[in-house]
Amino acid sequence: MSAPTFPFKENAYTLYSNALCPYAQRAVRAFNAAKVPYVIEEIDLKNKPEWYHHVNPQLKVPALRTPDGTILIESLVIAEFVADQFPESKLLSTDATERAQLRLFIELFSSRISPFIYRTLTSATVEDQNQAKESLLAGIKAVNDELERQWQRSSGKGGPFWYGDKFGFAEIATTSFVGLLVPLGHYRGVAIPETEEYAAFNKWKNAFFQHPGFTDVKPDDAKLIDAYKKFVAETK
Ligand SMILES: N[C@@H](CCC(=O)N[C@@H](CS)C(=O)NCC(=O)O)C(=O)O
């Protein structure tokens, strides 16, 4: 039996991606931040190519083919692989305590914010939508407070990024989901209040919204709004 075939570039990193997917954007941002060349194989999620199950049997993006033919899946695994494979990029600190604090930040963000972005869109009743919005704002507040704490580390340098003035791994792992506030604002009218309570989060968001690490990969607002329509439940 011959080996399954799928498109890839010889002696290069091939990233199977979708420009509108917040998980895939993590992998793209990791490669960009490490300044490592790669080629993108754009996967149409509405009409996936027949060969894609040979790359990722779970049929999700992102997936990465490394130059030696290894396939990696899962956005954070791919981003960490880039950081580990190219240590000169200094995307991850070598200090164990700092790495642990960074992982805690990503875990806090991933458990307290991301699920409620989706839940706010997929909830059908006003009551469920309001509950999801409340949980989302509570999550944003928790991340706000954690940012304030982390800015007190000597390498936190008072912000505006997790690593002081460096758009780094924390932003690679999380900012694409903050980008989903665009469809969330459009469909459900959610916005982060411009109050003292959320000042650190807004300072962080305003800084990365102007940084090429974010803007170079950020999808067009109208396209993102259109892509997220499929998650939006009609309000009963
Ligand atoms: N845990 C995965 C999640 C990836 C994921 O859910 N990707 C979505 C697109 S944003 C996907 O490929 N979904 C399959 C589909 O739309 O059919 C990761 O971190 O890479």
Image (cartoon, rainbow, N blue to C red):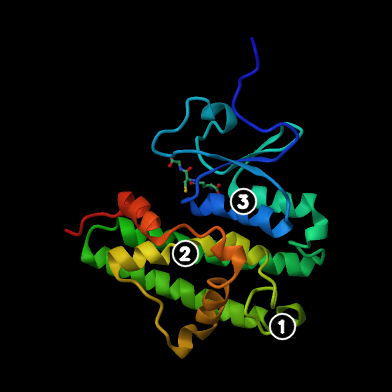
Local secondary structure at mark 2: loop
Nearer the camera: disc 2 or disc 1: 2
103 or 15: which is nearer to us?
Answer: 15
Residue occupying the far top of the picture: 1
Report the amino acid beneath label 1.
Answer: Lys
Q: CA distance from mark 1 to mark 3?
A: 26 Å
| Image position, residue 106 (x, y; %) | 60, 64
Q: Is mark 3 within 8 Å of ligand 1?
A: yes
| Residue 29 appears in the picture as rendered | yes
13 or 80: which is nearer to us?
Answer: 13
Q: CA distance from mark 3 to mark 2?
A: 15 Å
Which residue position holds label 1? Answer: 157
* Residue at point 67%, 85% (across, down): 158
Please give the label number shown on residue 179: 2
Q: CA distance from mark 2 to mark 1?
A: 24 Å
| Image position, residue 172 (x, y; %) | 62, 61
Mark 2 vs mark 1: which is more N-terminal? Answer: 1
- Which of the 4 image quarters holds residue 130? bottom left
